[in-house]
Image (cartoon, grey):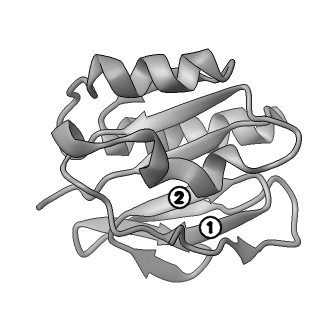
Amino acid sequence: MPPSLVSEAKGPGPQIAGFAEGGFRIDGDVYRSALLTPIGVAQWDAPVLAALVEADVAALLAIDPQPEFLLLGTGGEVARPSRAFVDALEARGIGVEVMDSRAAARAWGVLRAEQRWIVAALLPLQR
């Protein structure tokens, strides 16, 4: 079952304030790995990147309107998800932007400040 996204009522959605305990400080809470939409954040039991499938990010793909793209933070270092994962999202019209999780967290803040309708999946900084 996909995680439920905690409703976020202010500004450009969940705000990533920094890094803590191998994860992310988001709106005052610490998330080891997280799923973010413009309206909420959820703790995520992230699989290893090689095992990532479309169903793992289903909660992100269900928002309306459909997101422009998924910002995928791959952990402490940049790595590529499987081609099948990228193809599945692209078949839905959703691009996949891949970077390490620290860079993805920073990009989230910039892109949401621009009111871009995006989603993010951030794998933990350390396994």
Query: Which amino acid does the dot numbered 1 rest on?
Result: Val
Query: Where 33 falls versus 51 (above or below)?
Result: below
Query: Where 53 falls versus 93 (above or below)?
Result: below
User: Where does label 1 land, which residue?
Assistant: 41
Give the structural element (helix, strand or loop) at label 1. Answer: strand
User: Where does label 2 land, which residue?
Assistant: 35
Question: Residue drawn at (62%, 57%), measured in percent from left and top?
Answer: 59
Q: Nearer the viewer, residue 8 or 87?
A: 87
Residue 109 in which image quadrant: top right
Q: CA distance from mark 2 to mark 1?
A: 6 Å
User: Could you tell whether 26 is left or right of 73 in the image?
Assistant: right
- Residue 58 horizontal/vertical position (percent): 57, 51
Q: Nearer the viewer, residue 64 or 102?
A: 64
- Residue 41 horizontal/vertical position (percent): 62, 67
Of the two numbered discs 2 and 1 on the same chain, state the one appearing first in sequence.
Answer: 2
Question: Residue drawn at (34%, 44%), measured in percent from left and top?
Answer: 101
